[in-house]
Amino acid sequence: MRIYLDNAATTPLCDAVLEAMLPYLKNNYGNPSSTHQEGRTARAGVERARKIVAQAIKASTSEIFFTSGGTEANNTAIKCAVRDLGVQRIISSPIEHSCVFNTVNRMREEDIEIELVQLDKTGRANLDHLETLLKDRSKKTLVSLMHANNEIGTLNPIDKIGELCQQYDAYFHTDTVQSIGHISIDVSQLNISFLSGSGHKLHGPKGVGFLYVNKANVIDAYIDGGGQERKVRSGTENVASIIGLGKALEQAIEHLEERRVEIEAVRDYFIQELKANFPDVIINGDYAGQYLFTVLNVSFKTDTPVNMLLFKLDLKGISASGGSACNSGAVKESRVLATLGVPDGYHSVRFSFSHLNTKEEVDYTIAQLKEIV
């Protein structure tokens, strides 16, 4: 028996997504840039998926660009804002996903000023400090702050951040890779310049994502070539995966509320059982206020290091993680938790859920944790 509690790393492909993709892997194999029937069929599928993504976040189809995933989308937003929109300063945070954190730091080589916003104890951006930073209008500024933290699940108030950026004439980029499909986002009501999403966090395929670029912002090609994606992202489109992303997001939006209720019930039960069985347990981030309900980061008081905790859980048939899954399989100290501070003698595990998880799986996991920890 395997129990999968690492859905923040990736999610299993759902049957409806696979069924939607199969025709484009077998019969509808045309290049969407070709003018013949096979090409037109592929193009029609890509544009249907673009419409689904646009409708899901209340954007125009002309504002949606398909990418190879969230990392490329985030790189495109940040680097093109610097190159094409005159950005001279970036305000971000020390707990962004590595693809944002490292990209922002790379911009120092371009003589871009980097400021890090202060955080509260749950990892949420301090809006007063953000406003203080934004009051300095001497340099054109991009604010890059994620919606939901991928390790602890704390939500940033992207509505209020957007309002501050609008007030002080700054661009706003937000990474919604973890939250898209789980929390409703309406860009028509939010001041967002760039928004990134990915397919494989919501039961879609890996290797595909999208970037929303507000129509007020015009960026040039990030990848040069044949001019696909309206000359912003060249390269033959990954048609089947784009179809899968569209179907996965369509399913997620259609079942958003019922999935939230199911996942919340399992998560709340897990928290209840953790507190009952591990009196010294620490739950990191904002787990009871404004949080992403799919993520739960837990610190146990134990001498067993995190890599051994994860190894022992794996031997018991339980998949979890020590944090972000983007370190080539390495289990390193979490930059996020190091920033927020975890007491000495504690080691942290991230459990993350989907609507496929059950309370029975929680019972088994708690039983195994009691032996391991």
Image (cartoon, rainbow, N blue to C red):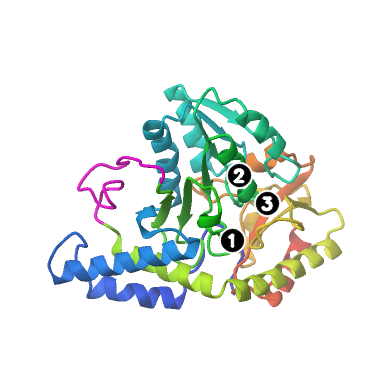
* Magenta-drawn stretch contains 235: yes
Q: What is the spatial separation of the Cα atoms under label 1 and label 2, in whole angstroms?
A: 34 Å
Q: Secondary structure at mark 3?
A: loop
Query: Going by the picture, which residue comes out furthest to the front?
Result: 167
Residue placed under numbered mark 3 in the picture? 154
Q: Is residue 13 visible?
A: no
Picture quadrant of residue 130: top right
Residue range in magenta is 216-236
Q: Quadrant of the N terminus?
A: bottom right
Question: Counting residues from the N terminus, which is met first, the one under dot 3 or under dot 2?
Answer: 3
Q: Residue at x 67, y 73 (%)?
A: 261
Q: Amino acid at mark 3?
A: Thr
Whichever of labels 1 and 2 marks the residue nearer the N terminus, that label is 1
Query: Marks 2 and 3: in contact by CB < 8 Å?
Result: no
Residues at discs 3 and 1 in contact (Cβ within 8 Å): no
Residue 4 point in image, percent of width and height = 59, 67
Q: Nearer the viewer, mark 3 or mark 1?
A: 3
Q: Nearer the viewer, residue 25 or 133?
A: 133
Residue at 66% x, 34% y: name it: 131
Taking the spot 52% from the left edge, 70% from the top edge, the residue there is: 252
Q: Which residue is mark 1?
A: 6
Can you say which quadrant of the picture contains the C terminus? Answer: bottom right
SS of the residue at dot 2? helix
Q: Residues within 10 Å of mark 2 (few under 14, many from 20)?
A: some
Confirm whether the magenta stretch covers residue 148: no
Type of amino acid under label 2? Glu
For label 1, count other residues whose C-alpha is less than 10 Å away and answer few (under 14), some (14-19) or many (20+). Answer: many
Q: Nearer the viewer, residue 164 or 246?
A: 164
Q: Main secondary structure of the magenta part?
A: loop
- The disc at residue 163 is 2
Under mark 1, the amino acid is Asp
Residue 186 rendering spot, x and y as whole percentages: 54, 59
